[in-house]
């Protein structure tokens, strides 16, 4: 399972860096076209907007995979032993539930309903529903990572590697 997580992490890193690089190019061209040429590019403005959505959401999934997502861990830092592991399992399950309901379910509904309406982007003429698919994709990745990490913690709890967990955290 660790190999699969590593492959997905590498793929997401490459994908996010590629999107970020393209985003920077779009913004640079937008600035140049607006202030030097005097004719702003509406196409790159729109592409940059949508790329930013994808970079933010796929990047959030990537940071979840690296266990570097935003967290308030004051309580977790004070816990030791089995209580700490149980708390970490609960946190992973909460992340999975949030990602399931908000990102996968809500994001899929948004994308599908938007596709059904036939809404197009103003400058590019792309179907807006496809752009919104970054929500369920990001959510599915977060669920995958959360389930993998929860399983690791459950195995740690069952095997009695509580001391190992405390040593890794310090």
Image (spheres, helix red, strand yellow):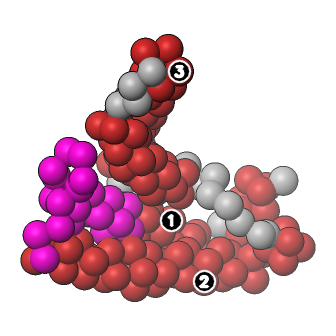
Label 3 or label 1, whichever lies nearer to me, is 3
Can you name the residue that lies furthest to the right here? 78
Determine crowd level at label 1: few under 14, some 14-19, many 20+ residues with C-alpha closer than 10 A. some
Q: Nearer the viewer, residue 67 or 132?
A: 132
Q: Which secondary structure lies at badge 3?
A: helix
Instruction: Specify whether residue 132 is painted magenta.
Output: yes
- Name the residue carrying label 1: 149
- Name the residue carrying label 3: 35
Camera sees residue 69 = yes
Label 3 or label 2, whichever lies nearer to me, is 3
Can you name the residue that lies furthest to the top here? 36
Query: What distance separates the C-alpha of mark 3 from that of mark 1?
Result: 49 Å
* Residue drawn 31% across the image and 68% down it: 136
Give the residues in magenta: 117-140
Q: Nearer the viewer, residue 112 or 46?
A: 46
Query: What distance separates the C-alpha of mark 2 from that of mark 1?
Result: 11 Å
- Name the residue carrying label 2: 90
């Amino acid at each position: 399972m660790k190999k699969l997580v590593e492959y997905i992490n590498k793929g997401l890193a490459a994908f996010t860096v590629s999107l970020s690089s393209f985003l920077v190019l779009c913004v640079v061209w937008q600035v140049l076209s607006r202030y030097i040429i005097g004719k702003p590019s509406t196409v790159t403005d729109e592409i940059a907007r949508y790329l930013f959505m994808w970079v933010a959401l796929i990047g959030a999934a990537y940071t979840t995979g690296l266990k570097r997502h935003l967290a308030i861990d004051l309580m977790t830092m004070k816990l030791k032993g089995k209580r700490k592991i149980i708390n970490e399992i609960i946190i992973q399950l909460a992340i999975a539930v949030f990602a399931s309901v908000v990102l996968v379910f809500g994001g899929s509904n948004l994308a599908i309903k938007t596709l059904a309406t036939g809404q197009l982007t103003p400058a590019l003429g792309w179907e807006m529903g496809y752009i919104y698919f970054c929500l369920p994709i990001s959510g599915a990745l977060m669920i995958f990572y959360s389930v993998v990490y929860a399983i690791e913690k459950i195995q740690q709890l069952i095997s009695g590697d509580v001391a190992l967990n405390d040593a890794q955290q310090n």
